[in-house]
Image (cartoon, grey):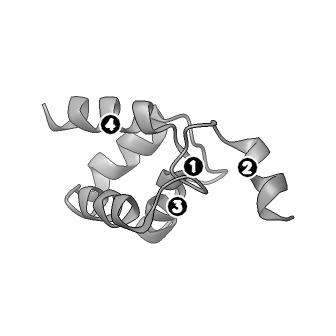
Amino acid sequence: MTNNDHSKYHPVDAFCGNAGPYEMEHLDYLVSQLTDDELKKLVDRLRIFFLSRDVPREEYENVVDEASREDFYREYHRILE
């Protein structure tokens, strides 16, 4: 699958393929501040699902960039409240 094909499967405003290096660094920093449970809750709220619940943290971290930026920031702040 090429990057162009891949972009069809996530929101237009997703980080993936649209964010610059500084925004991606910021995203990585924000994600690193979450506990494992908070990260799993965030990914669930972003409607990114895995076939198994037995997935390592790294996999959760790797899919966050598929989310809409607006959804990510909204749900991230809700989880921290």
Residue 20 at x, y percent in the picture? 45, 61
Which residue, given by chain and number where applicable, does mark 2 sit on?
Answer: 7
Cα distance between the residues tagged 4 and 1: 13 Å
Q: Badge 3: how crowded within 10 Å, few (<14), some, or many (20+)?
A: few
Mark 4 or 1, nearer chain start: 1
* Above or below: residue 62 compared with residue 50: below
Determine which of the numbered discs, if any, sits on residue 73 in the image.
4
Closer to the observer: label 2 or label 1?
A: 2
Cα distance between the residues tagged 2 and 4: 20 Å
Tell me which amino acid carries mark 2. Ser
Work out whether residue 78 or residue 29 is closer to the camera in this orientation and state it.
29
* Above or below: residue 13 compared with residue 37: above
Marks 2/3 in contact by CB < 8 Å: the verdict is no
Closer to the observer: label 1 or label 3?
A: 1
Which residue, given by chain and number where applicable, does mark 3 sit on?
Answer: 54
Mark 2 or 4, nearer chain start: 2
Point 43% across, 31% down: residue:
71
* Above or below: residue 68 compared with residue 24: above
Mark 1 or 3, nearer chain start: 3
